[in-house]
Image: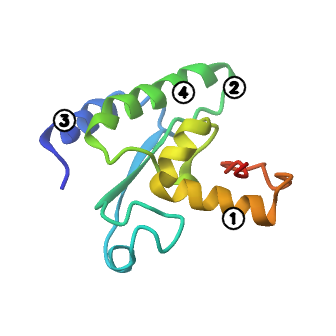
Amino acid sequence: DLSEKAIDLHVKYSAQLPTMHSTMHLYPINGAVHRASTSDTAFSFRDANFAEVIVGVDPDPANNEHMIQWARDYWMALHPYSAGGGYVNMMMDEGADNVKAAYRDNYARLAQIKATYDPSNLFHVNQNVEPAV
């Protein structure tokens, strides 16, 4: 369920969309996602009911910083009402801490797998899992 405070924040930020191209998608998560264990795959949010994607888009590159700030402010406001982390396939350049938060308890196992199959970190142009040392 979405808390009343989270709903209020969605209403607030949707009223402040910086452009007609900007949006927030709220995806329901249910069914098969809930039937797997949090450790069965890399995706660890098996108990979540919703995923959100905040998108700030403006065709004018001069507004880039404003778009980024709006999306970050929106995310930061909602974060206390979330399960933490995020869905790695919807992340941009979020930094190593947010990548670890996205995988939660699965990160250490993924780092071990990476150390076995990609110890030189050749495949790093993504939301990178560093090989375990």
Callout 2: 10 Å neighbours few (<14), some, many (20+)?
Answer: few
**Rendered image quadrant of residue 116:** bottom right
Q: Secondary structure at mark 1?
A: helix
Indicate which disc, 3 or 4, sits on the residue closer to the N terminus.
3
Callout 4: 10 Å neighbours few (<14), some, many (20+)?
Answer: many
Dot 3 corresponds to which residue? 8
Residue type beneath disc 1: Ile
Q: Are marks 4 and 2 in contact (CB under 8 Å)?
A: no
- Residue 113, label in figure: 1
> In this rendering, is residue 116 above or below 55?
below
**Outermost residue, front side:** 133
Q: Are marks 3 and 4 in contact (CB under 8 Å)?
A: no
Indicate which disc, 1 or 3, sits on the residue closer to the N terminus.
3
Residue type beneath disc 4: Met
The residues tagged by marks 4 and 1 sit, at their Cα atoms, a distance apart of 36 Å
The residues tagged by marks 3 and 4 sit, at their Cα atoms, a distance apart of 21 Å
> In this rendering, is residue 72 above or below 85?
above
Q: Is residue 50 left or right of residue 59?
A: left
